[in-house]
Image: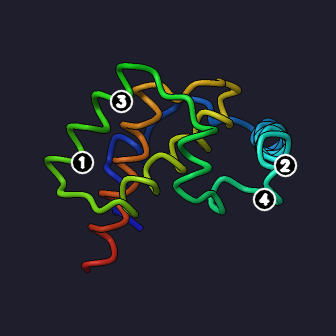
C-alpha cells in the first residue's frame, strides 16, 4: 500500500458510507452481467480483446488518452486491454455507459500505482 500523505490523514471530509459503496458495486455487477451474459461472461475482467472491441464504448477524448498512454508507456496489447477493462469497471461504478477520459486516466493511475508497489 502506498504511504498516506499527511493531508490525507488529517482531512475532515466525509467518506462515502460503506452502504452506498455496496449499492454502487451491486449496481455495477448487474450492469456487467447484463452486458456480458450473452457471451457467457459475468465480469469485465473476463473480456477478451474481441469482447472489448464490441462492447466497450470509448469517447473520442478517452481514445486520445489511451493512444498517448499506449505510445508513452510502451504498452503491450494485453496492457492496453487491461486498462480498458479497468476503465469500463470504473464507468460501471459511476453508472456511466461510455468510457470517458477520466475513467481511462484513473485506470492508468491504478496501473502505475500497482507497478510502483510491486517493484518495492
What secondary structure is marked by label 2?
helix
Alpha carbon of mark 4 to alpha carbon of mark 1: how far?
Answer: 27 Å
Q: For this rendering, which residue is in front, 16 or 46?
A: 46
Q: Residues within 10 Å of mark 4 (few under 14, many from 20)?
A: some
Alpha carbon of mark 1 to alpha carbon of mark 3: how far?
Answer: 10 Å
Can you tell which quarter of the image residue 67 is in? top left
Horizontal and vertical percent for residue 106? 41, 40
User: Left or right: where does residue 45 sit relative to residue 95?
Assistant: left
Would you name the residue on which mark 1 appears?
A: 70
Give the mark nearer the N terminus: 4 vs 3. 4
User: Which quarter of the rendering shows the C terminus?
Assistant: bottom left
What secondary structure is marked by label 4?
loop
User: Left or right: where does residue 33 sit relative to residue 72?
Assistant: right
**Residue occupying the point 83% across, 47% down:** 33
User: Left or right: where does residue 65 sit relative to residue 56?
Assistant: left
- Numbered badge on residue 112: none
Looking at the image, residue 1 lies above or below residue 77? below
Would you name the residue on which mark 4 appears?
A: 41
Would you name the residue on which mark 3 appears?
A: 63
What secondary structure is marked by label 3?
helix
Pointers 4 and 1 in contact (CB under 8 A)?
Answer: no
Horizontal and vertical percent for residue 110? 40, 53
Would you name the residue on which mark 2 appears?
A: 38
Alpha carbon of mark 3 to alpha carbon of mark 2: how far?
Answer: 26 Å
Looking at the image, residue 3 lies above or below residue 118? above
Pointers 1 and 3 in contact (CB under 8 A)?
Answer: no
User: Which quarter of the rendering shows the N terminus?
Assistant: bottom left
Alpha carbon of mark 2 to alpha carbon of mark 4: how far?
Answer: 8 Å
Amino acid at each position: 500500500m502506498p504511504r498516506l500523505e499527511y493531508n490525507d490523514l488529517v482531512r475532515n471530509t466525509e467518506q462515502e458510507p460503506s452502504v452506498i459503496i455496496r449499492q454502487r458495486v451491486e449496481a455495477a455487477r448487474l450492469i456487467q452481467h447484463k452486458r456480458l451474459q450473452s457471451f457467457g461472461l459475468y465480469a469485465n475482467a473476463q473480456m477478451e480483446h474481441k469482447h472489448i472491441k464490441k462492447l466497450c464504448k470509448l469517447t473520442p477524448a478517452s481514445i486520445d488518452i489511451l493512444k498517448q498512454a499506449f505510445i508513452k508507456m510502451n504498452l503491450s496489447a494485453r496492457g492496453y486491454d487491461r486498462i480498458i477493462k479497468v476503465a469500463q469497471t470504473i464507468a460501471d461504478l459511476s453508472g456511466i455507459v461510455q468510457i470517458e477520459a477520466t475513467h481511462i486516466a484513473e485506470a492508468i493511475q491504478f496501473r502505475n500505482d500497482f507497478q510502483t508497489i510491486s517493484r518495492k
